[in-house]
């Protein structure tokens, strides 16, 4: 009698093989969005690691502007990391990509990219590549951030993740800035931003 755990392993390997050898490779776009501290990058890394485990070829990009933790890696707040290519703009992704061999393309901090990323993501998906994009859906004023609305519109799959409001424990929806800078691109950590729900955000804007 075959050990059930060995049998399960065979089944898992069989499905993995099917996934890799899939003849009619279909591309699509997935977007993971949410406020800061919502676990977007953590979710991006989780999906990319799963693809890596299935022996798929992955390439990861992030805007050069984001070097908070590490110049070459994508690092989540929880400290998980994965190696990425920092790029100047969306066109650099096309120059660096190996279109023949890549299966999955990961893009982090998409809100900082130029508009060209919409065409780049569409082109890659049309070529049969799975494109996984993570980004902040709104800026610190609660306004849609950069090209994120367009990316959400063209994606087949959208996942919105939430942080917890630091004031009341409800689901947060915005990354409220607690410093006085007006600069839209202010990279910061717990000392510059706090996740707030709609009620607490509106209350804190009023009290200013
Ligand atoms: Zn709240």
Image (spheres, rainbow, N blue to C red):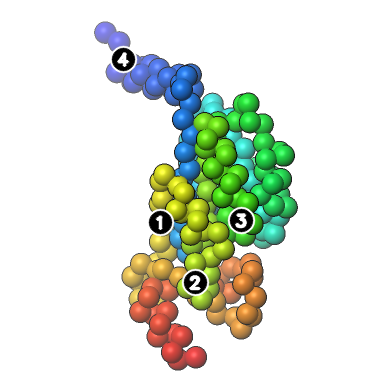
Which mark is first along the chain, 3 or 4? 4
Tell me, yes or no, if residue 142 can be seen here. Answer: yes
Which residue was labeled with disc 3?
115
Q: Which of labels 1 and 4 is toward the front?
A: 1
Q: Where residue 114 sits: x, y (%)?
A: 64, 57
Q: Residue at x 36, y 67 (%)?
A: 171
Question: Which residue is situated farthest in the bottom direction here?
Answer: 207
Which residue was labeled with disc 2?
143
Classify 10 Å Cα crowding around label 2: few (below 14), some (14-19), many (20 and above).
Answer: few
Helix, strand or loop at disc 1? strand
Which mark is first along the chain, 1 or 2? 2
Helix, strand or loop at disc 3? loop
* Total numbered badges shown on the rendered structure: 4
Which residue was labeled with disc 4?
3
Helix, strand or loop at disc 4? loop
Which mark is first along the chain, 2 or 3? 3
């Amino acid at each position: 009698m075959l050990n059930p755990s060995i049998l399960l392993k065979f089944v898992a390997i069989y499905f993995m093989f099917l996934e890799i050898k899939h003849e009619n490779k279909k591309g699509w776009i997935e977007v993971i969005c949410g406020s800061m501290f919502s676990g977007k990058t953590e979710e991006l890394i989780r999906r990319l690691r799963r693809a890596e485990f299935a022996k798929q070829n992955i390439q990861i990009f992030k805007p050069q502007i984001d070097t908070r933790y590490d110049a070459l890696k994508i690092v989540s707040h929880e400290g998980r990391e994965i190696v990425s290519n920092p790029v100047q703009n969306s066109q650099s992704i096309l120059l660096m990509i190996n279109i023949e061999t890549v299966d999955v393309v990961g893009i982090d901090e998409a809100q900082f990219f130029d508009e060209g990323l919409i065409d780049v993501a569409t082109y890659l998906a049309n070529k049969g590549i799975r494109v996984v994009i993570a980004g902040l859906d709104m800026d610190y004023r609660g306004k849609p951030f950069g090209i994120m609305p367009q990316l959400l519109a063209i994606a087949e799959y959208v996942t919105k993740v939430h942080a917890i409001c630091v004031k009341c424990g409800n689901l947060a929806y915005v990354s409220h800035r607690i410093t006085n800078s007006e600069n839209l691109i202010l990279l910061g950590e717990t000392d510059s931003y706090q996740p707030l729900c709609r009620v607490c955000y509106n209350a804190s804007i009023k009290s200013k």
